[in-house]
Structure formats: structure tokens, C-alpha cells
Amino acid sequence: MKRFIDTLTNIWKIKELRRRILYTLGLTLVYRIGSFVVLPAVNPSILKESLSTQGNDLLSLINNFTGGAFTNASIMALGIMPYITASIIIQLMGFAVPYFQRLDKEGESGRKKKTQITRLLTILITLVQGGGYLSLIKSFGAVSTSVPEGIFWLSGIIILSAGTIFAMWLGEKITDRGIGNGISLLIMIGIIATLPSALVFEFTSKTSAGGLLIFVVEMAAFFFVTLATILIVQGVRKIPIQFAKRMVGRGNINMPVSGARDYIPLKVNAAGVMPIIFAQAIMFLPGQVAQWMARGDASLLSSGFMAQLVNPFSTVSSIIAFILVVVFTFVYTALLVNPKQYAEYLKRQNAFIPGIKPGKDTADFIDETTTRVTLPGSIFLGLITIIPAFAVAAGVGQNFALFFGGTSLLILVAVVLDTLQQIESYLLMRKYDGLVKSGKIKGRSGSGMQIGASM
């Protein structure tokens, strides 16, 4: 406890770090306040009741990422998600479109151009999603009939677009003048905002039924799942590299000097949360089609394959999601990790992997190592995706079970590690002790030789 208090004291002593933390807390507070500002002419209670009775899993996931702003009919109802969608599209286009590949090679100027394109694409996506959200609100009867329809649509889309742009601005300001990655922090704040209510509901439901011991077991299981996630997020396979010897000296006397040593960090989970996002997006499609088909015959969703497909906690849904995550992990890792690029970079730097010939043999070795490392990482991601289904089957409430795995847990772990890594770097630069007794906190960036932004 004394060490924890000393660490907090050291953090407060560093003026720049103190200013950045307070600045970040202030902007995140503004973001949370915005999630409770309701759109004009909308009754959020009707929207909440309609969504709870409908049980739409896609809308529940969106509401989870926005911290309840979606069901509150807030000006921040779409949150930062349109920006995330635009960023994913731009990133994928960077793998296939030559223009974006050239921007990646232009350095800072290319990064600024991609940022501007991402912002414009965010506005377009917000206009489309905003129209869909307003249609959803109107279909539930949550809009006041006293407001003309044209005024409601025009003002609603403008306000939702302004809310998303404001959230994007807050995230960029946190990145520039705060601590941590602003966009990631806003997503984490939205996710973690629903955790206290889910935890309280789980506690009251278990203790009221005399199951306090069961709640303790659930918390222990949640603790160990979080630890396992941290280990995998930080897991790195280090490939040692050796730089060639150089000759130093004066006149006729030259002495060989051994080259420096470094390593290539191949992450066990190089793909991050992207495979889970892709898999969930695909899983929602047949579920939405099944619900659309069931409008004429509600019995289609009461039993059988359709019911299993719509239920994200069912056995069929879990098996399909697991397979999709494993496949997408290999695909996305293949896009991110380019063995030929590593081999060419080593050759230009006059470096080599001990025991491996430069060129094609080096590229083949990195490719083979990446495949071996990705296999356990993909299996883990698949298990993380379906752990909530196991938790529900064990008696955990659905709201709390969502934090046992999936994108929620991975984002929470990754963002917290990145933020703590930045705080620790400030402490170490000022000659203070780090946040842990031994070693250093490693975020997603890690250390070692990095090639390009995508690495």
C-alpha cells in the first residue's frame, strides 16, 4: 500500500504528467456528460423500453460501445464508432489501393493526408448511420408528433454529425495534449461505463438468492481471464538479429568491432481485436436476416437452427464465431506482417538473423515463425470470443458475461496497458521507480525493431 501511495505521489510531482492526466480526465468527463444530452423531440424512455423488449444483439453491442448513449437517444448516440469504421476502411484500403500505399511511404505528410481522408469519410458514414438511427427511433414511436418530420430529420442528422465530430475532436485532443490514445480511451470509457451497473446487478441477483459464494467464484474467474488476456496481449516472439561487424581505427591499424544486437518482435496477437470485430459483423448478418424472416412467422426463432443462429450465446453461434475469428486472425496477420519487407530492411541495414541466409531464406523463416506464433494467438482470440457464452451457461448474467471476453475485454486490457506504459515512461525519465517492482509495462507498441507503421 505504501508503494502505491508513493507512486501516486511521484505522479503528482511531475508537472507535465499531472497536467496531462487532469486534461484527459476533464475531456473524458465532457464526453460522458454529452452522452446524457437527449436529442430534441425524442423520448428516451420509450426507446429504452422498445430496445429491451426487442432484444436486438447488434443494437446492444453498439449501446455497449457508446456507454449507454445509444439508448439515451443522446447527441453522442453514435459515439466514436463512425470514426473507427472509417479508420478500418482506410487501413484496409492501404493494403490494396496503390494511392494509400504511396501515402504510407510519404511519412508525416502522407499521414496527415490519410487523417484528412479519414475525417471526411467519418462525416459520410455518420450521415448514413445517423439516418438509420433516426429511422429506428421513429419506428419505435419515440419521436414527438408535434415536431414536423422534415425539421426532425434535418436537425437530428446535423446534431448527430456534430456529436460524432466533437467526439473525434476530443479524442484527437487527448492524444495530443493528454495521456494515452484519445480515440481508444473514449471507446474504453464507453465500455467501462456499463460495467458498474452490470456488476451491481450481478451482485444483487446472486446475493438475493443466497449465492454470495457463487459471486466470489465469478469474480475470481473474471480475474484469471483478465490475467490470461494480459499475457497474450503482451506476448512477443523475439527473433534475434545481428548487425555486421565494422572496421574502426586510424591509419593502417583497423580493428573489427562486433555489431549491435536487436530483435524483431512478432506479437502473439498481432491482429488485435480486428478479427473479433469482423467475425461479429458477419455473425450479425444472418441473425438480422433471420429476424426479418421471422416477422411473418415468429415460430421460426422459437426453436431450431434459426433460434441458435440468432442467439449469440448458443452452441451453433459460438462454433461459427470461433472458426471465423481463427480464420480472420490468420488473414489479418498476413496483411500486417510482411516477411519480404523485413528481409529487405535487414539487407539494407547490413543485418541478418543468426544461422539464416539473407534474402528469401530470411523471409521464409519469418513467415514460418509468424504462422507458428499466430496459431495459438488465433485459438486464444476464438476462445475469448466465446467465453461469454460459457459464462452465461454457468449462470452469469448476460450483461456481466459480456466483460468476460470479446472486444470489450481486449480493448480494456490493451488501452489500460498503453496508458500505464506512457505514465511509467514519464516516471522513469524523472528517475522515479516504475509502476511495477521489476521489469517494465509493455503496451501494444512494445520495443525492438519496428518496420513501417503497420508493424
Image (cartoon, rainbow, N blue to C red):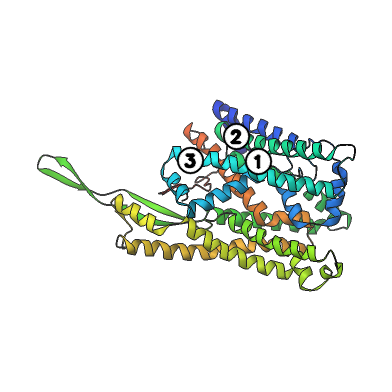
Q: Is residue 345 left or right of residue 286?
A: left
Kindly identify which residue carries mark 1.
186
Q: Residue at x 72, y 44 (%)?
A: 130
Q: Which mark is residue 111?
A: 3
Mark in front: 3 vs 1: 3
Residue 79 image position (x, y, % from top left): 69, 42
In the rendered structure, which disc, 1 or 2, sits on the residue that comes first in sequence? 2
Label pair 1/2, CB-CB below 8 angstroms: yes
In the rendered structure, which disc, 3 or 1, sits on the residue that comes first in sequence? 3
Q: Which mark is residue 243?
A: none
Q: CA distance from mark 3 to mark 2?
A: 18 Å
The three-letter amino acid code for the residue at tag 1 is Leu
Q: Residue at x 75, y 64 (%)?
A: 289
Residue 198 image position (x, y, % from top left): 78, 50
Label pair 3/2, CB-CB below 8 angstroms: no
Q: Residue furthest right?
A: 146
The three-letter amino acid code for the residue at tag 2 is Ile
The three-letter amino acid code for the residue at tag 3 is Arg
Q: Which mark is residue 174?
A: 2
Q: Is residue 377 visible?
A: no
Q: Residues within 10 Å of mark 2 (few under 14, many from 20)?
A: many
Q: Which element is circle 2 on? A: helix
